[in-house]
Each structure stands twice: as C-alpha cells, then as structure tokens.
Amino acid sequence: MSDFNAETGELVIRGKGRKDRLAYATNGSAEALKDWLFVRGGNPGPLFSRINKAGRISICRMTDQAVLYILKKRANEAAVSAFSPHDLLRSFISDLLDAGADISTTQKLAGHVNVTTTARYDRRGEGTKKKASELLHVPYRKPTRDQV
C-alpha cells in the first residue's frame, strides 16, 4: 500500500533484481485502483491481495500462479484466446508506441534495462512503418525536359 500514492497516481513497481521504477496510474487505471482500494481497504500490505472463494479479502501477496489463473479465467469469460502477463506487456509497449510515446520512455515504463528488449516486444506491423515514413517530407522538383 505504501507504494501507491492515490493523489498523484505514482506507483512504485518492484522489479527483478531489486530494481524499482516509478509508474503512473492515470485515466481508467487510476479509477480502477481507487475502486479496488475502496473494496480492499487501507490496511498495510500488498496492494493486490488474495480473495478467497467466499469473496473475503486476505491481505497477503498473490502468487505468480494466481495471476496466471486470473488471466486465464478472464480470457475464458471474455471468449478470447488465453493470454499471459507477457502478452499484456507486449500490448502495453505496442500501445504506448502507437500512441506516440518514444521508445526510451516506453523502455523505462516497461522496466527494461536495454532498449533492444523493448523493441522486441513491439508487435506493430508494416502499416506503422509506412505511417512513420509519411511523416517526412522529401523536397523534390520534377525536372523539366531541358534538364533531363
């Protein structure tokens, strides 16, 4: 709970190798977190915690397996193909890049040490490259017959 500032939306993400980074809950994610905190309560402990089959919240850390189970359950309910946390990261990265975020900022938000790791997650296709190419203007004047 101490890693989230509801007023500013700042969220400390505890990464691999004890490398923490700062992220921001904005727009829909901020609203979803506020709703979750209303249900969860303000007790110290993990921001996201277990809910037992009776619907009671247990203020203890969720396992990786529990997160995967939730994603599989939600995919089934939505009648979409199963997806993993890495699929969500891939979508996060591609959506940020599609929205115009630069790759360096996206790298930091994804928690990657190397920008090439972030680039590997980019699922955007040829249309994105074509659109980027159209951002440049190449000045060209067609030569007259005398100049040919």
Image (spheres, rainbow, N blue to C red):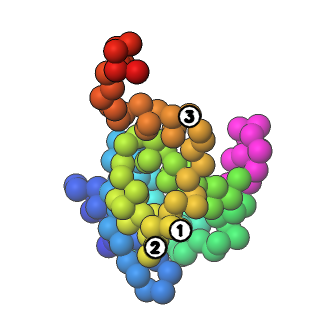
Label 3 environment density (alpha carbons within 10 Å; few <14, some 14–19, many ≥20):
few
Give how far across and how far down residue 118 sits, in percent. 50, 63
In the rendered image, which quarter is residue 110 located in? bottom left
In the rendered image, which quarter is residue 24 located in? bottom left
Residue 127, label in figure: 3
Give how far across and how far down residue 99 sits, in percent. 40, 40
Label 1 environment density (alpha carbons within 10 Å; few <14, some 14–19, many ≥20):
few
Report the predominant secondary structure element of the magenta stretch: helix
Identify the residue shown where x is 72% and y is 46%: 75
- Start-end of magenta stretch: 71-82
Q: Quadrant of the C terminus?
A: top left
- Along the horizontal axis of the image, is 35 left or right of 84? left
Q: Secondary structure at mark 1?
A: helix
Q: Are marks 1 and 2 in contact (CB under 8 Å)?
A: yes
Give how far across and how far down residue 21 sits, in percent. 36, 72
Residue positioned most to the front:
146
Residue bearing the label numbered 1:
117
Count the labels in the image.
3
Residue bearing the label numbered 2:
114
Pick whichever of labels 2 and 3 is earlier in the sequence.
2
